[in-house]
Image (tube, rainbow, N blue to C red):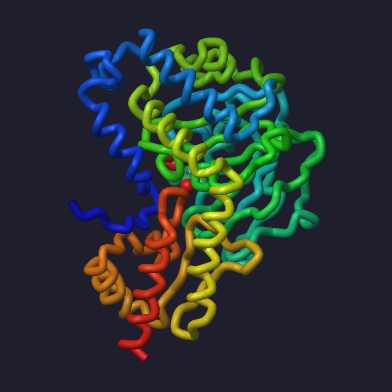
Amino acid sequence: MTRVYNFSAGPAALPESVLQQAAAEMLDWRGSGMGVMEMSHRGPQFTQIAAEAERLLRELLQAPANYKLLFMQGGALAENAIVPMNMLRGSASADYIDTGEWSKKSAQEARRYGGVNIAASGAASGYTAIPARDTWQLDPQAAYVHICSNETIGGLEYQYTPDVGEVPLVADMSSSILSRPVDVSKYGLIYGGAQKNIGPAGLTLVIVREDLLGGALPCTPTAFNYQVVADNGSMYNTPPTYAIYIAGLVFHWIQQQGGLAAMEAHNAAKAALLYSALDASSFYSTPVARECRSRMNVVFRLPDERLDAAFLKGAEARGLVQLKGHRVVGGMRASIYNAMPLAGVQALVDWLREFEKTQG
Ligand SMILES: *Cc1c(COP(=O)(O)O)cnc(C)c1O
């Protein structure tokens, strides 16, 4: 068996030991005589699996007791609607910080449910920088302030948690959750699809402060009402059981690696290795302002896009796959989430140097 270094932005690579364990338990989960996919979500085995996943997640995030951890479905794009439905709570509007493709989508969807104030936008910089906090035009009456912690397509990431005062901060953390420690108490709500840093597609995490529950718009589908989901322990309807099981194995793996502080050190080292190789070259270029560079999604370009196909072909021959950038920004993108080993980034750096030599 040959495994490649998979730089996909999502669904993305998972830790090999997790896949091995899942394979070993596929037909018979710990003497139960059945696989996890075949279990009743209300049976004793799966109840244990889900409780353990939630316990580990709470521990990793050090989430305070007044936060609910919800296992939902629909992905971040569904949350773009579910968040305003649940979080407007009688307010006329919410503030959105526009930093690229994903936050733009969030704001567009929210407009279907209430007023949206774009309190700051990176459009003027071509989305190469996150507008400085002191330029944001926040509305103190806003229901919440929405940010995208890591713009997966543009390759921009907040390196700090913005202070927005008393108004709840809501973050789409799809592509950065569990990549570094986070002070959950600074957020009203955090959401994210699992398929970047956590597990299979199909599972959506929501971490929400208890006092914000209970004010959903009447049109909110019952299965997407946070209060209902919380009151039913994420089992109002059948949850994505297999995805929760794999997420639990990933949480356990992260804990074994040393938790989120260790993940951050590992991710910072990988990003530094790759960005410094790109910076040292006059052949490759990186569009994003240094202080906003994502540690998860490294966006770069070759000097001429006619070279892209040869670069990608050579990369693939070396087992380095999924490096093509998103069609909206073009160029290349290396997604280096938690499960990407340093050796994978080193192999990419070696290929960057080799390719440059053959062209230069
Ligand atoms: C991938 C991604 C999305 C889209 O998530 P879906 O699970 O496909 O709905 C939204 N926001 C961010 C930041 C993402 O990385």
Total number of numbered discs in the rendering: 0
Any part of residue 94 in sight: no
Nearer the observer, 148 or 90: 148
- Asked if residue 155 is positioned above or below residue 171 in the image, the reply reads below
> Which image quadrant: the C terminus?
bottom left
- Asked if residue 32 is positioned above or below residue 16 in the image, the reply reads above
Q: Quadrant of residue 114?
A: top right
Residue at the image position 39 percent from the left and 37 percent from the top: 199
Any part of residue 63 in sight: yes
Nearer the observer, 145 or 256: 256
Q: Quadrant of residue 183?
A: top right
Q: Quadrant of residue 349?
A: bottom left
Residue at the image position 65 percent from the left and 15 percent from the top: 214
Residue at the image position 59 percent from the left and 15 percent from the top: 227
Residue 213 is situated, as x and y percent measured from the top left of the image, at 65, 19
Residue 150 is situated, as x and y percent measured from the top left of the image, at 56, 51
Nearer the observer, 91 or 210: 210
The furthest residue to the bottom: 360
Residue 207 is situated, as x and y percent measured from the top left of the image, at 59, 29
The furthest residue to the left: 1
Nearer the observer, 99 or 354: 354
Residue at the image position 56 percent from the left and 59 percent from the top: 268
Residue 285 is situated, as x and y percent measured from the top left of the image, at 49, 77
- Asked if residue 291 is positioned above or below residue 34 in the image, the reply reads below
- Asked if residue 183 is positioned above or below residue 324 in the image, the reply reads above
